[in-house]
Amino acid sequence: MAAFDTDILGSEPTKRMMMNGPVDTLFDKTSSKLVGKPVTRVDGSLKVSGQAPYSAEFYKDNRVYGVLAGATISNGKVTNIDTESVADIPGVIKVVTDAKHFLRNSQQGGKMKAPTQGAIDIAYHGQPIAIVVGETFEAATEGAKALVVSYEDETDEAALDFKQELKNAHEVNEKEGSDKNSEHGDPEKGLQQSAVTLDRVYTTPSQSNSPMEPHSSLAYWEGDKLTIYTSNQMVAFSQKQIADALEIDNDNVNVISRYVGGGFGSKLGISPESIAAAIAAKELDRPVLVMMTRPQVMESTVRRSNTRQRIALGCDENGVLNTIIHDTISSNLPNESFFEPAGLSTHYLYRGENRRVNYEQVDMNWTLSGSMRAPGEAVGQIALECAMDELACQLGMDPIELRRRNEPEEDPSQQIPFSTRQLLACLEQGSKAFGWEEKHSSEPASYLEGDWWIGTGMAVASRGNQLMPSEARATLQLDPSKTLGVKAVIESDMTDIGTGSYTVFSQVAADLLGLPIDHIDMQLGDSRFPSSPGSGGSFGAASAGSSIYLACAELREQIAKRVGLHADTIQLGEGQVSKTGEHQAGVAERAVEAGKKALDALVDKVEDATEKVGLSVSMKGSNNIDPEQYDFSDSATYPLADIISQLEDKKLSAKGQIAPGKNGKSHRQACYGANFAEVAVHRVTGEVRVKNMTGAFTAGRILNHNLATSQCYGGMVFGIGAALMEEVIHDKRDGRLCNHDLAEYHLPVNADVPQLEVILVEEDDPYTNPMHIKGIGETAISGAAAAIANAIYNAVGVRIYDFPITLDKLIDQLPD
């Protein structure tokens, strides 16, 4: 581990860390133990009372409304936009167009540049081409519907049928993707020579992210400065994308996303309404609010790509795998680089010396495909885990036992150790809680309960763990309104998309600074704050949280220096500073201390010399406190507020910076889990009801048990949707999205969701970050749909390879 401080005269002290080995965590040494506790959301009361402002709820004087107008063809060009066609509609102010700068589609997460721009060339039905601005939302809506647009229609040449376009599949852009093609051994030969083989093709449909809050942006200009309140998961990247799209400096863009009503990947990058709002606001010199309708969100942001996946498995008579083949074809708009990384976990989930993960892509004139919660694993593990279940049946083996026999000792694709791997513990605890041995029958269609066939299924889960560069600031300052007279202000552009960022980061800061949680002022979602990677990829809490952790750790050390303690002997608790234990100095520290003493001596000489010639120069800074006034013998404590009050500015600030190091390549880091499901299938209609589900998951140290459990509930519900109902349908004739609202795009509702049980398996991973945590939000999705599909097979003996599993695919195959 490499960590070092900077405290140069006049600069903000910063603690930096790169993960180059295992590290200890201060959570084991703090006096308070809020981290891990089921603390209630600190922003909960604001949300339920309607006081948490979302992007569309900010108000600026003289605000007007903009409504996007979308293309009604799937391929071709715009030849004319008749702005006069809406001139007589009361309340309509103007039709704003910008053929060059309008966004064709949304941007992917983590990108520095604008997405594809241009409103002339049409690539899909619903592509935004203009914005109608009105004094009221109703006027703008009427104008957008009435706007007359002429086209050069080339829809007849559009790619609208995925199966027909499979012949045109091409290589993916690996440099731009989140996974790469890989091959070890000789997979095809290994498959042929295996004693037992399975070779299947699975298809999964496009899915809509469907966040509760539609995409919206409020934009206004003050001279050359643009402020935009927008619903976005990654503020720092969004700022750069907006600046690039508008061809202005980053410093002239301020992005604010204080509360985000869900995203699930659709808000990782900017979407078309943001740039349209900014352009209209500039042209009219008035604040412009653009709120996408639900159909617009589904048509012109992103979708999860549909996939065609071939899974081939080869093993010996005992079920020990020697061959795994996972070939995926996904789709996207022409010239877009994102592809669905369905084989991400296939690289390391099971043993096997012969293995291949391969990707191809098909260009389609459909909505942009991009990241949707657990991109890759969510659909990839549907195929892999259904194949593993079928192989277990073929072998006459319990599916849990098959997975035990194929547990690798190290990452089989890279030959590197796992940082931690608690998959077997998840299987053991999950199966016991679910009652697997009592419920599961090895014979399908063996239990009829009234008119319902009953079956059970399971699947494992895995989601890779990442650490991203992040920075945060922590400031201790006096606050007479607080019981202890002091509060901590934490600043980061990190977002809270409903996952609980405000709460878990407050817990981290409270523990490290020894303050009650209501003494933490968590400031998030503003590009003026230090930058983080944002919410996405299950790396948000670990990355932004680690930078907050380090900023608070630096404050601890700054306080320790001022009261004559060392970092390993200071204790902060309930607003008091005390001493704990004895300092253990290392070799490096002794060398640094010697250097500091020499520097102090030199500073004293310089100050003495300048004083003799009539000058007054201080090189030690004005915030130094005489540490000799503090005597920590006899368990003495001192109020933190008193220490801060002696500083010239009455406050103390520090930054924290985290960056990935060697650990990301030296160790395979991932979360694991096991999903168990019990289903009922009606013997006449084929209707499927999920009776109950149990999931056991690991995610390193858990920051908040309530919030982590809630995330797992959400993941399991995602699995129900993927297994049984979710499917985006594009019309093969003209490319229209047939089910572009929540009435026709079916999502799980309360009646579809049974009793869910979540088990958080204890784990501590010192290789991940200084908090030892991993992202959990996307782990529970992975494998959840496969567990349901496997339970359906167990109930009625029917394997479905084309998802979702709707009753029409079962009804003619049901047992008598």
Image (cartoon, rainbow, N blue to C red):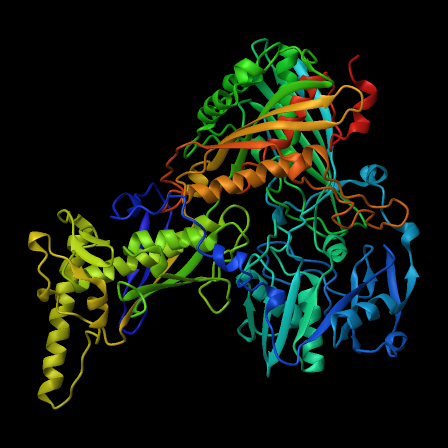
Judge from the rendering whether residue 404 lies leftward or rightward of residue 441; answer left or right: left
Snapshot quadrant of residue 772: top left
Instruction: Look at the picture and state if 627 lies above or below 294.
Output: below
Residue 195 visible from this viewpoint: no
Position of residue 338 measured from the top left corner of the image (x, y, whole percent): 67, 48
Q: Nearer the viewer, residue 285 or 607?
A: 285
Front residue of 49/249: it is 49
- Residue 584 image point, x, y percent: 15, 47
The residue at 39%/57% (across/down) is: 657
**Left or right placement of residue 729 versus residue 432 in this view:** right
What residue is shown at x 23% (from left), y 66% (from top)?
A: 641
Q: Is residue 112 left or right of residue 568?
A: right
Q: Residue at x 74, y 77 (%)?
A: 135
In the depicted view, which residue is nearer to us: 319 or 183? 319
Q: Specify the quadrant of the image occupied by residue 344.
A: top right
Q: Position of residue 247 (x, y in %)?
A: 64, 73
User: In the rendered view, does 9 fall on the left or right side of 312?
Assistant: left
Q: Is residue 569 above or below residue 670?
A: below
